[in-house]
Image (cartoon, helix red, strand yellow):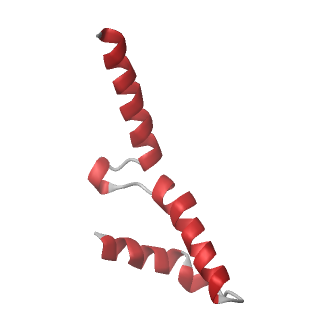
Amino acid sequence: MAESSFATLKTEFCYRRIWPTRARAIRDVAACIEERYNRRRRQSSIGHVTPVDFELQYSSQAAEIQLAA
C-alpha cells in the first residue's frame, strides 16, 4: 500500500515542480503529505472516506456511547 501511495504522490505533486533547493523540496513534500495527502485523500482501508471524516465519525460515535453510559 505504501508503494502505491508514494507513486501517486510523485505523479500528482513531485513530477510537476522544480524546486530551487533540496531543503525547499523536502519541506514542500512534507507539507503536502501532512496537510493535503493524509487528510483529504480517501483511504480504502477505512471505507473510502478521508482520514478527517473518519476521525469525525469515530469521535461522534464515541461521544454517543459516553452519553448513553
Q: Residue at x 40, y 79 (%)?
A: 7
Query: Percent position (x, y) of residue 37?
Result: 49, 62
Relative to 44, 30 lies left or right: right
Q: Is residue 66 above or below residue 45?
A: above
Image quarter where the N terminus lies is bottom left
Relative to 22, 65 lies left or right: left
Q: Residue at x 43, y 74 (%)?
A: 8
Q: Is residue 68 above or below residue 30?
A: above
User: Quadrant of the rendered structure where residue 22 is?
Assistant: bottom right
Depth order, front residue of 68/40? 68
Image quarter where the C terminus lies is top left
User: Quadrant of the rendered structure where residue 55 is?
Assistant: top left
Query: Percent position (x, y) of residue 31?
Result: 59, 66
Q: Residue at x 67, y 86 (%)?
A: 19
Depth order, front residue of 48/2? 2
Depth order, front residue of 62/45? 62
Outermost residue to the top:
68
Q: Residue at x 62, y 73 (%)?
A: 28
Query: Percent position (x, y) of residue 42?
Result: 40, 54
